[in-house]
Amino acid sequence: MKRIYLAVILLVCAQAATAQFYKTDTARGFDRSRLMVGGSFGAGFGDYTLVNVSPIIGYRFSPMFAAGIAVNAQLSWEKLRAFNGEIISRYNYNMFGGGLWGRFYPIPQLFLQAQPEYNSIGEKLRDYTRDPVTTTKTRYGAPALLLGGGYAQPIGMGNSAFVIMILYDVLQDDRSPYRNRPVISAGVNVGF
C-alpha cells in the first residue's frame, strides 16, 4: 500500500512540475498537431507464446476531449506436455476486433475513458492423446464496455505522452476476454 501512495505522490509532483501546451485558437478544420497515435505491443515466447498488437488512433478535439478508434489483435499458442516432455495437446487462441474510445480530461494529465468494443474470438484444441487425433474449433463474438481512467505524462516537445490506465469491462459478457479483472496498460501516445 505504501508503494501505491508513493506512486501517487510522484505522479502529482510530476504533474505540478510540467505542463502540456495545446493550441486554443479558433481555427476551423483539421489540425494535424491534434492527431494522436499509440497503443500497445506485447510478446512472449516458449511453450506458451503470446503476441498482442493493439494500435489506437485519435484526435484531440479540445483540451478536455479526445476520441478515436482502437484495434485489437491477439494470438496465442500453448503446448501442454506430459511428465516425459511429450506434447499431449496444443491450444490456439486468436482475438480480432476493436471499437471506439473517448477520453475526458478534467485536468490536463488525468483522464476518464470509455471504450465500447466488439471482439471475434477463435479457439482450437488439438488432443494428441486420442487415436485418431481430435481437433475442436470454436469461434464466437464478445462485446465489451471498458470504463476507467488514467494518467498522461507529457514527454519531449509537442503532444507526445507516456500513458498508464486502468479499465474494467462493465458488461461482463460470459465470453469476454477481460473476465472479471481490471485491464492495466501503459504505453506512449505520439502527437504530431
Image (spheres, rainbow, N blue to C red):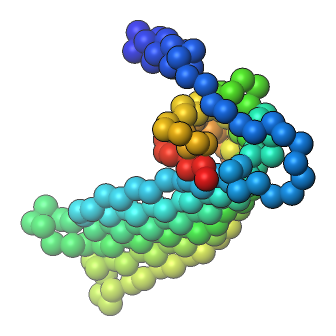
Quarter of the N terminus within the rendering: top left
Dividing the picture into quarters, in which one does residue 147 lie?
A: top right
Q: Residue furthest left?
A: 84
Q: Residue furthest bottom?
A: 132
- Residue 72 seen by the camera: yes
Q: Taking 191 as reference, is 182 above or below it?
A: above
In percent of width and height, residue 184 lies at: 52, 39
Residue at the image point whose x is 84% and y is 40% from the top:
25
Residue at left offset 69%, top offset 27%: 108
Q: Position of residue 96 (x, y in %)?
A: 59, 69
Which residue: 30% across, 72% down?
A: 89
Count of numbered badges drawn on the protein: 0
Q: Residue at x 67, y 33 (%)?
A: 21
Q: Is residue 70 above or below residue 25?
A: below
Judge whether 30 appears above or below 24 on screen.
Answer: below
192 sits left or right of 87 in the view: right
Please provide percent x and percent y for residue 4.
Answer: 46, 16
**Residue 84: which quarter of the image?**
bottom left
**Most foreground residue, 150 or 168:** 150
Residue 102 visible (yes or no) = no
Residue 126 coordinates in the image, percent (x, y): 37, 78
